[in-house]
Image: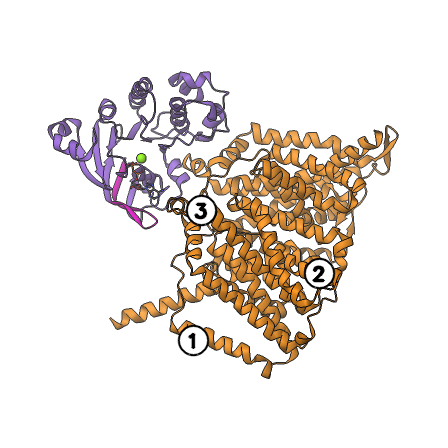
Chain colours: A orange, B purple
Amino acid sequence: MAFFFAQFLTGLANASSLFLVASGLSLIFGVTRIVNFAHGSFYMLGAFIGITLMQILPGAIGFWGAILLTGLAVGLIGAVVEMLVLRPIYRAPELFQLVATFGVILVIQDLALMTWGAEDRLGPRAPGLRGVWRIFGEPVPKYDIVIIAITPFILFALWYLIARTRAGILVRAATQDREMVGALGVNQAWLFTGVFALGSALAGWGGALQLPKGGADLLMDFNIIGAVFVVVVIGGMGSLPGAFIATVLISVLNVFGVTYLPQSTLVLMFVVMAVVLIIRPYGLLGREEVAGEHGQVGAPDMPIRPYGPVGQALVAALLLVLALLPVFADQFMLILMIDMIVFALFAASLHFILGTGGLVSFGHAAFFGGGAYAAALLVFHTDTPMELAFLFAPLAAGLLALAIGWFCIRLTGVYFAMLTLAFSQLVWSLAYQWRAVTRGDDGLVNIWPSDWLGETASYYYFTLILGVGGILFLRHVIHAPFGYALRAGRDSPRQAEAMGINVKRIQFAAFALAGAMAGLAGGIFVFSKGSVFPTELEIAASFDALIVVFLGGVKTLAGGVVGAGFMTVVEDWLTRLEYWRLLLGLVIIAVVIIAPEGIVGSIRTFWNRIRGSEEEAAK
Amino acid sequence: MLSVEGIHSYYGKAHILGGLSFEVRRGEVVALLGRNGAGKSTTMKSVMQLVRPRTGSVMFQGEDLVGKPAFRVAQAGIGYVPEDRRIFTDLTVTENLEVGRQPHRDGAPEWSVEQLFDIFPNLAERRGNRGKHMSGGEQQMLTIARTLMGNPLLLLLDEPSEGIAPVIVEEMASTIMRLKAEGLTVMISEQNLHFARAVADRAIIIEGGEKKFDGSFAELEAHPEIRDAYLSV
Ligand SMILES: Nc1ncnc2c1ncn2[C@@H]1O[C@H](COP(=O)(O)OP(=O)(O)O)[C@@H](O)[C@H]1O
Ligand SMILES: [Mg+2]
């Protein structure tokens, strides 16, 4: 019993820091409707700035003063980010905002690397709070007890701010109807900046407060974001009490999980989330989202139509060059091309569900990696012939997409995105923690193709045929009645329903198809590399695909493909630089703000303008 | 006080207002009449810049509002009560009023929470209640009170009589008369001619986003064919 209680206290102590971070994210989302992926970066900044300040300021007063100052500093950084990056794009579709916050992650990562170096830092102990106190005979770290004692005060301060001050009233009103708040004379720009600064400050405090229990490293940003999203989704996005309940639930479960089911700590969290969402799709205390309340992917400005003769000739010429490539290209070039085609197919499958289906999935890597793992597991454990195992990749990924889609399709917009992300994290944590089957981060190795595909050139043709075939197939589906129905469901769901289209079922099928195609790409990938690791399932992998689709252009079919080509080349070139993340992040942010149509979209607009003026001149 | 000149407003590609012009003078109550879908709400949103007119001007006290953000329009002294009310249902009555609070401005009647509770006694009784537990009439009172907290010079009321009980409609009429007596300028949109005639000094009739009539109720009475053509009575 005493042991249980001690465990429970540890859970509560962990909850404190997580709650601070999660409440910040929830607050920001509630008011601005922006899902701030960079939130984990503010947590990380909090940890690093905290350590630095603690080194400067001595003693107990210095320690707690440093924590206080850290929050203020991170809040200030948040305000700057909001003004520079987010202000210009509040009216842009969700995807653009997400991509922009992803750019912020990259920039902060490299700035942190420049400032604090690559080594992990151990957090300083809190002065006067080393060691343990005995509670019912069980040792509990003193710092844990102090945190538990402080938490109610933090909660009270937050509650007071939100419930009792004019600022808090405005924040709650804006969470419900920000346009009306504006029509009543409140300048939302400052309200948004203020909320973003507060949310960032909370993340910074979370990062500083956990220092004596952990430390600071450059992976913290991604490591926390999964848990934070789960908490916010379980609690209901935008609800602080919900975030609190969910944090305690998750943290306590986690502590007991570590003791009794050490293999399942990561998975456990997502299982809880899935259960909650089946019962309450908008989380414990969340509010149902009114459809069309804020921008989706954005209606296409012109209908997608098949290419004219010039376009078709270009595509044919490109295919011809690709087919003849092994004649003049070297080994290295072919491998790069295989990577590019795999990535292009993966991106095209995401583009299909995102651009045509209007469903912004954040967890698409689950299907790419899922397909790769399905094939690799068969080969690794049962020595299945490559041909058969390969077929299994799209099949398993398609089935996985059916399962995940069953949960997710009922939701729309941000909720859909968060849920797909959470499920992909579930798949990732399975691959990472179920070592008996997946070998964890040692990965599955020696997954080579059959002899007839052993040569790089022959595997290149294999990739080319399946990759290009897959992309053309997706293109065909988009121009088939199924694709029209899918687009109708995206642009005006109500009218589509009225026309007799079962929008949800069409979306469900499209989601499964997109998953299967991503799995196909994963299958090609695993046999080209000969191995697969959990990194293929990470959030970062899903984001890479999102960024590629976005850079290429959401509204154009070629977007995913062009983006993938561009990205493969640019990454190959950029990663030779030391601070390539910083550059890439800045490029992404610049594209979001300056050329939101992406590469293909911008070229097309430019082309149309030239042609338009020629036509006018001819008249 | 308010002078709207040739505004064209769109929802996406749908052309809703086709060059609408009208004026509202200080101290008067003007009724904007027209059938469902005539463009009354769009007109009010175009004044508030919740819908941005693509061309034309909205002059208020010598300042062109077109292109300004809605909060600037409110700060310039125009109070807006939307037809779907949009009260903050998670907030209490007092908190709803707090959201609307703006500093006093010259030439406008000044309102305090206590004065508003005096005008709307129902709200006083429910001051601690959340918006979602209120009747339609009470919600309507709350939106008006909330907007008055901004001490506006001009009040835009979008179909205040819609969907509330007849007794409350009468109460609403006397409330509007009282606001006028306090020196507030009011523009209300209405389909209910009877109600409009009871409170307004002048009528503007629109149909298909264009002005069809602008004059006194006596003139309107003299031309029943206008009424029959543009209003469903
Ligand atoms: N949000 C909107 N999107 C597209 N069309 C709209 C929207 N709101 C109103 N409309 C159309 O604009 C026209 C005028 O509407 P509205 O201004 O609401 O009229 P009224 O208030 O006089 O009933 C109607 O034809 C209506 O269908
Ligand atoms: Mg209307």
Residue A378, numbered circle: 2
Q: Residue under circle 3? A: A502
Q: Residue under circle 1? A: A313
Image quadrant containing the C terminus of chain B? top left
Q: Is residue B145 left or right of residue A140?
A: left
Report the magenta residues as a range: B1-18
Q: Check disc 1 and give the amino acid type.
A: Ala
Instruction: Measure the C-alpha gap from mark 3 to mark 1.
Output: 37 Å
Q: Nearer the viewer, residue A251 or A369?
A: A369
- Residue A203 location (% of width, % of height): 65, 43
Determine crowd level at label 3: few under 14, some 14-19, many 20+ residues with C-alpha closer than 10 A: some
Marks 3 & 1, CB-CB < 8 Å contact: no
Label whose residue precedes the other's in the sequence (1 or 2)? 1
Q: Is residue A20 left or right of residue B116?
A: right
Q: Check disc 3 and give the amino acid type.
A: Asn
Instruction: Measure the C-alpha gap from mark 2 to mark 3.
Output: 36 Å
